[in-house]
Amino acid sequence: MPEKCPVCGFRYELELGFYWGAMYMSYGLSVVIVFLVGISLYFLANDPPTWVYLTTVAATIVLCTPALFRYARVLMLYLFGSVSFDPTFNRK
């Protein structure tokens, strides 16, 4: 992850350890994914054996990990970093 935004110069890490909270957000997002995959398997696959649940959930979480890592940090910036997107900003 770059230290600063190449367009506006915003420093991403507002303070030391700022993104530790993103780990908890990532965990929360993972729990939601596990819940949704489990419910989907139960209804769409007619309650398969336990190994199918474990394999499918593990594969889904492993495939989603890069996105979870990124979006947990984005949520952390937006919720606690006083950051907002300005589409009209244009550095000259």
Image: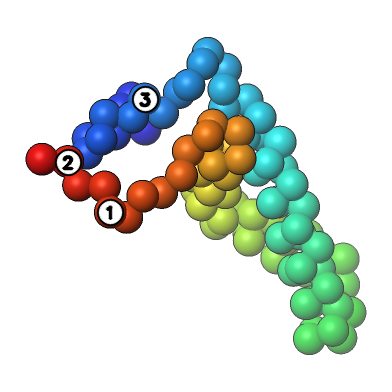
* Residue type beneath disc 3: Arg
Quadrant into which the N terminus falls: top left
| Whether residue 16 is situated above or below residue 3 in the rendered picture | above
Mark 3 to mark 1: distance in Å? 20 Å
Q: Residue 10, percent across and down?
A: 33, 29
Task: Assess whether mark 1 and mark 3 are in contact (beta carbons under 8 angstroms).
Answer: no
Q: Which residue is mark 2?
A: 91
Q: Residue 7, percent across and down?
A: 22, 39
Name the foreground residue: 73 vs 31: 73
Q: Tell me where residue 91 sits by quadrant.
A: top left
Q: Which residue is mark 3?
A: 11
| Whether residue 45 is situated above or below residue 62 in the rendered picture | below
Q: Residue most toward the left? A: 92
Name the foreground residue: 18 vs 32: 18
* Mark 3 or mark 1, whichever is nearer to me: 1
| Whether residue 91 is situated above or below residue 15 in the rendered picture | below
Mark 3 falls on what kind of element?
A: loop
* Mark 2 or mark 3, whichever is nearer to me: 2
Sequence-wise, which precedes: disc 3 or disc 1?
A: 3
* Residue type beneath disc 1: Thr
Dot 2: few (<14), some (14–19), or many (≥20) neighbours within 10 Å? few
Mark 2 falls on what kind of element?
A: loop
* Residue visible at 32% across and 55% down in the picture: 87
Question: Is residue 73 shown to the viewer in this render?
Answer: no
Mark 2 to mark 3: distance in Å? 16 Å
Mark 1 falls on what kind of element?
A: loop
67 to the left or right of 37: left
* Residue visible at 36% across and 25% down in the picture: 11
